[in-house]
Each structure stands twice: as structure tokens, then as C-alpha cells.
Image (cartoon, helix red, strand yellow):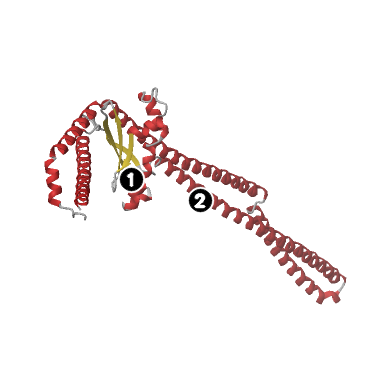
Amino acid sequence: MYETFDAFDYLDYLRRRWRVVASACLAAALLSLGVSLLLPKHYTATASIIIEPPGGSDARLTTAISAMYLESLKTYELFANSDTLFARAAREFHLTDGSPSWESFKRQVLKVSKLPDTKVLQISVTLRDARQAQSLAQYLADETVSLSRQESRDSDQDLVQQAAKQASDARRHLQDLQQKWSALATSEPIESLQSEIDSDVDLRDKVQEQMVAAQAEAAEYQTEQSDGQFAREQLQGAQARAALLAKRSQDLERDIQARTVLLASRTARRQALETELKVAQESYQSVTTRLEEYLATAGTHSERLRVIDPGIVPQRPSSPNISLNVALALFVALLAAMVCLSMAFVYGRRSLRFDAAVARGMHG
């Protein structure tokens, strides 16, 4: 028959063996303290960078700071956490001399993080030398700012180059149109042609006046031709002049119409070229203005990084954490002692029950 668990017996069992628990905790504390004192000390230095909004007339200045925007700033961790940058820093400070892998060393000593809901980027470096840790953290912070500025300049330089190419193409197109305009003005003049038309119109009017006069004179001689030979001769002369003047008037009319058609054609081509030239001038002015704006605002279209705290030389080691190690050792020792005593308590009760059962069987 099994006995039920008695909590008072269990607590009494633990009380009578408190020295076991105390000895285990003391041994664990002393051991963890000794190991912690023997472990090499490491110091952590932290440099801080502020990520400021774009300057100048960038449209993003009007954008409210939102959680999404702050989260997007985590991309700047890539600058500080760059393998190329850390490799250069490792060579600069002779950190990996004799080390087979600087990648694993980087994971051990470098931590880069943007503080949640802030615009602050922190670079933490952990090394055995406190001064070297601070110097490396400051170096990485300065180089991160430089990398960001260089990236901003490169990005703006691309915009400047594109705008400069557009301005060059627009200027070349404008010059071509100006040359076409000069050639058209020389080869197809309008003013002289208009003057010729005006002269022909004036001449046609005069010829028509003379033709009307000749016709009137012929009509007059027509009534007088029965008066004699002289009248008939004058009639023939007046009719001949009227016919000649009529033909001259027709020739002038055809010339005027032909020149008018030519003038309209030249005017249409000139107006089309003028429109194209005006559009080209406006386009050139627009791209030139844009180029000037890009040149004036270069380096202000992206966030600006600035070191606000280069960090200080740490006075206390970040590891080993002696108090934490001792506390953890005490907890583990206490837990292990309790488990061992509990198992011993259960085993002891089972042995007693077994012995009692054997004894009852022998008496029976």
C-alpha cells in the first residue's frame, strides 16, 4: 500500500539537510567568482549618430515624422555595419592580426542598432582595451557619416549629370533650330516677297486704270469712226493699247497669285519653325533652371547624419558581469540541490515502503 505525499515530512527533510543546499550554493558562488575574476575583461564603448531630415527645398521636409518613416531609417544600419568599413577599421587598428576570420570577430565586437521610435543610431564596440574600444566606435561613427555623405553626393551627382546632359541636348537642339531659322530667313525671305507683291498690286491697279482709259477712248473713237480715216486709225490704236493693257493686267494677276501662294507657304513654314523654336527655348530654359537648382542643392536631398556623441572611454568592464554570474550560479546550485534532495527524499520513502512490505511478508 502506497503512502501519500506528506509536505511536512518533505519540508522537514529539507530543513535537516540545509547544509547540503548551503554548501552547494557556496561552492557555486566561489567557483563562479573565481572563474569570473580569471576571465579577461571586455569594455564596451558606444557612439551615437543623429539622422536628420533632408535639408534644402526637398519635398520630404513637409512629411510628418511617422512610425513608418522612423522604421525606414534602419537602412542606415547598413552603413555602420558594412563589411568593407569594418575590414578597413580592423586593419587601421590592427584588430585581426593573426586572426583567421575577421567576420566572426566582427560579430563578437560590433553591434549596430537604431533606437526604436527615434532618429538615433548607436554603434557599440566591445574590446579588451577600453581606449581602443572608444577609438574604434568613434572611427566607425565618423566613417558612417562620411559614407552617408558620399552616397548623397554620388546620388546628387547622378542627378546633376542627367540634368547637364538634358541641358546639353536642349542647347544643341536649340542651336540647330536657330541655324535652320537663319537659313530659312536667307533662302526664303518674306519681306522682299511681300514688297514684290505690293509692287505688282500697285502696277496692276495702274495698268487697269490705263486699260479702262484705253477702252473708254476706243469706245469714243468707235462712235466717230464714220467721220474719217483719222478716227478709224485712232480706234485701232486705242483697241490695241486696251488689249495690251488687258494682257498685262492678266499677267500681273497671275504673278500676284503665284507670289501670294508662295508667301503663304513661306509664312506657314516660318510660323511652324517659330513655334518649334519657342518650345525649344522654353525647354532649354527649364532644364537649365533645373540644373542650377541641382547644383545649388547638391548634398541636401537625403537624410544627413551627424555624430552627436563619440562615446567615452568605459571605466567599468561590460563582461564578465561578476554579480550576474554569481547570481546565476547560486540559482543553478540551489535548483540542482533541490532536485537532488527531492529525488533522494522520494527514493528514501520508496525504500522504506519496500522494506516494510518485505517485513510484513516474512511475518505473514
* Vertical comparison of 34 with 208: above or below: above
Q: What type is the residue that disc 1 sits on?
A: Pro
Q: Which mark is residue 281?
A: none
Secondary element at image label 1: loop
Residue at (64%, 46%) from the top-left corner?
183
Location of residue 41 with respect to 257 vertically, above or below: above
Residue under label 2: 282
Q: Residues within 10 Å of mark 1 (few under 14, many from 20)?
A: some
User: In the rendered image, which quarter is residue 83 located in?
Assistant: top left
Mark 2: few, some, or many residues within 10 Å (few <14, many ≥20)? some
Residue 198 appearing in the image = no
Residue drawn at the location 47% of the way across and 41% of the way down: 160
Question: Which of label 2 and label 1 is nearer to you?
Answer: 1
Residue for badge 1: 53
Q: Quadrant of the N terminus?
A: bottom left
Q: Position of residue 188 (x, y in %)?
A: 67, 51
Query: Residue 92, percent across and down?
Result: 37, 25
* Residue 364 in picture, x, y percent from top left: 20, 53
**Mark 2 vs mark 1, CA separation in Å:** 34 Å
